[in-house]
Image (cartoon, rainbow, N blue to C red):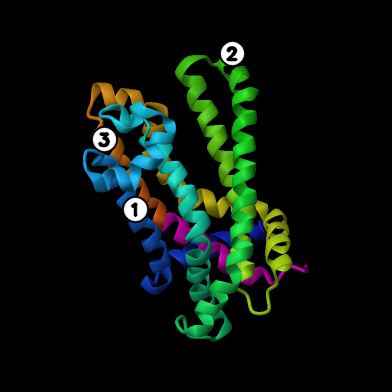
Amino acid sequence: MGEVRGAMACVREAWRDFRWIEYRPFAWIMGAQLLFVICAMNLGSAWGVAGAGWLLRTAGEPAVHYPASFLFMSYAYARFESILFALAGSFLIPLSLARIQAPMAGMPPTGRETVGRAVRAYRATFVGYLISFALLIAWEFLLQAGPRRWIHVVLGGFKGDVATWLIGVLVAFAVAAIFVYVPIRAVEAGSTFRGALWGGILAGLRSFVPTFLIVLVFVWPTLILFAPIQLKAMLLVTRFRPELIAVLLAMAAVLSSFVNYFVYSAAARYHWLAGKEPE
């Protein structure tokens, strides 16, 4: 219970102590996501094709033609987001964390030292993201190959789809809870690649319950936006307007940006309170 109370205290503190300078790296990620959605909505233009068509086309030629392009938009968005977080997020997330941790270490949130910590954290954060992404791909394959069939036998139809989707996202949140400490440890003074990567994963495993709770507290609102996109995309395109997919994705990008910031902010505070884990 003490760990849970500590996690909730960190949630409240992260929410109360929001600072633009700390959040700004996540805003840059959000800007790139929104730009991709705008490009995906304008595939009739050269800049739209250049910005999003190359990724949509990996789903087949129909994916770049209206209105089928909106059916594949969430597919392309998810892959763009993966590339964005791997390449840019591996620097921007540690930069935000270095600014969050600066007051805890008695340092200013800006300056060469803060940027230097983010740069040094890039390699461990990048590798940690690749490992977590590989685990998620493997889990998605296993879910579709096994549990999904059993769930549909019991529940059938749409209820089975919802149950499978919820199980999938809960496991994804669990993986995120385990790997959230990799960049947090990577920006600490004197951190090594091994200490950040494996030490961060061990810290996530040891603090799994409170960290998973932190993730759930902040992330659940995004499910309201992603659920119709991922479960009923065909209905949105055929019964309503295809552009609703893009609107929901844009709203999800904005909301997820703040959610990710608050999750990392609360987790960084919790890690600081708990003290450094032995490597």
Q: Residue at x 70, y 72 (%)?
A: 192
Amino acid on which disc 1 is placed: Val
- Residue 279 sits in quarter: bottom right
Label 1 sits on residue = 254
- Residue 153 sits in quarter: top right
Is 270 a magenta residue?
yes
| Image quarter in which the N terminus is found | bottom right
The answer to which of marks 2 and 3 sits earlier in the sequence is: 2
Amino acid on which disc 2 is placed: Val
* Count of numbered tags: 3
Q: Nearer the viewer, residue 65 or 224?
A: 65
Q: Nearer the viewer, mark 1 or mark 2?
A: 1
The answer to which of marks 1 and 2 sits earlier in the sequence is: 2
259 relative position to 122: left or right: left
Q: Relative to 95, say whether 168 is above or below.
A: above
Q: Residue at x 51, y 79 (%)?
A: 114
The answer to which of marks 1 and 3 sits earlier in the sequence is: 3
Q: Nearer the viewer, mark 2 or mark 3?
A: 3
Highlighted magenta segment, given as a residue range: 258-279
Q: Relative to 270, say whether 237 is above or below.
A: above
Q: Nearer the viewer, residue 88 or 264?
A: 88
The alpha-carbon separation of the residues under discs 2 and 3 comes to 32 Å
The disc placed on residue 153 is 2
Q: Residues within 10 Å of mark 2 (few under 14, many from 20)?
A: few
Label 3 sits on residue = 244
